Image (spheres, grey):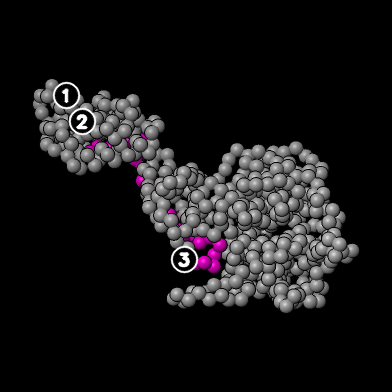
Amino acid sequence: MRLKFIIVLTVGLFAAAATAVAQPSVDTNHSVEIRREASLRFPADVENMFYLDGMLHFYTGGMLMAAPCGRGFVGDAGIDTALLSIDEGLNYAVRNPSTDVLFFTKKDRKGKNVLYECYYRKNNTIATRKVSLAGFSYSVEHPVFSPDGKAMVFSSDCPLGMGGTDLWYSMWVDGSWQYPQNMGSRVNSTGDDVAPMMYGDFLIFSSNGRADSAAGYEFYSTRFLSLQQQGDTVSMYPVGMSPSFSLDAPFCSEGNDKLFVVNDKSDEGWWVSELPDGQDCVYGFIGRLDCVKLYGRIIDNEGNAVPNSVVVLRRYGMPDVLVHGNADGVYALYVQPSVQCNIDFKARGYFSASRTMRLVRFDENELYYALHYDVTLFSLALDSAYIYTDLFNSRAGCELSMSGCSRVDMLARFMTDNPELKLTVISLYSGSNDASFCGLLNEARNKTVFERLVAAGIPKTSIVTGGEKPQGFESAILNNREQAVLFIFSR
């Protein structure tokens, strides 16, 4: 089941500027931190988004806008006067990471997106010119470059592709860009495949034409140059040979998820998701995505979902990281690979479960390697009586046996995991006709259990000893008159 992380934001209406919106919660994990407390909401569709020179830029409602950003946060947006000074029709810009040349797109009179580049004249002033792709005459949308600057990937409505808008790539060879090639059926679908973004060795894009899509546009990733390993030999294969994988939640929602950008120099990025009201919202993240995604479902011993669980990731020398499971018991953690970590799974009213794991990426063709891990949490029912008959070494003694110590320690652990609970302890010894002796022994046994619980860290105020035994347990007590001790958990 797909996790749904849609946040409904409240903002005032505005005409020319987007507004940063305060949000109360942050979803964190050890590799990626999702920034939801500072988001931008736009009254019109965001057609383009890109990161350039320390600013996040948006093309929306026929206007180019820019906003300060950092650490996954976004500030208030205003008109992008700096880039519009280069060309008033500019709707997208990107630098070649190898040459630092600025490329940009703008629409011609027919509405086709055309690619341009900036260059310096002999007098050291900046000029612009169209970029030739060896006679390619179709639109060029959202171009991005490989880390070495020798490959350019873009989306285009060229009719020679798989259908709809496809992703294409052009190689820089002998001083010129070659005629673009379609990235093929492992990347492109019969629908629209748009907005490519390079992320290290991976290409992230949005698509609305895949069978596994739960909504309209969703984000996918593919290794730009595919890898295949045989023994100790790693081989590189051509562009478009790697499979594509969904990014899933929280990046994919039930609305359209269409634009994804990164600042890989500081491991941060942003994406656009459509809200239930149809407006676009920008969210951010920090951390590296090429990691291990540990995910699964937390259930009880009867196979039912444990809602509102808490998962705590612990690593030596680093702060603990906490994530919450959803109402269906589903959780997800993003963890850097090859690192041993301790993970605690907790929920109110259940025993916690701890696991020590070393997470490894087994498939380098996936942006984050998905590792499925379900967890079962066990519980003791509240306001129900539990009778134990093996706590003491002798029939008329008050010293705990080894099994008795284990049982009481187990009850203490349950109390530690659920500190809001109260525990009632009632010794039910009735193996003698001497009522006074029975009373004294029951008091001594209650005290022994009480002291063991307190020694385990349970507050004295959380333990009640003695009292009237509940009805309905006479047969169990009668069969174990010399050993029966009754425990009741309550709030």
Q: Where does the image place residue 298, in percent across and percent down from the top left?
A: 44, 50
**Three-letter amino acid code at disc 1?**
Gly
Measured in 3D between alpha carbons, the distance from the residue under mark 2 to the one under mark 1, in whole angstroms, is 14 Å
Q: Does the magenta stretch include residue 378?
A: yes
The residue sitting at 16% across, 24% down in the picture is 439
Where does the C terminus fall, quadrant-wise?
top left
**Three-letter amino acid code at disc 2?**
Thr
Residue 272 versus residue 119 in the image, above or below = above
Q: How crowded is mark 2: few (under 14 residues within 10 Å), some or many (20 or more)?
A: some
Q: Looking at the image, is mark 2 or mark 3 earlier in the sequence?
A: 3
Numbered badge on residue 439: 1
Q: Along the line of sight, which residue is nearer the eye, 65 or 263?
A: 263
**Three-letter amino acid code at disc 3?**
Phe
Indicate which label's residue lies in the foreground, 2 or 3: 3
Q: Quick one: SS at disc 1?
A: helix
Q: Along the line of sight, which residue is nearer the eye, 22 or 390?
A: 22
User: What residue does disc 2 label?
Assistant: 448
Residue 484 versus residue 355 in the image, above or below = above
**Residue stretch rendered in magenta on the structure:** 363-389
Numbered badge on residue 362: 3
| Residue lying farthest to the right in this orientation | 109
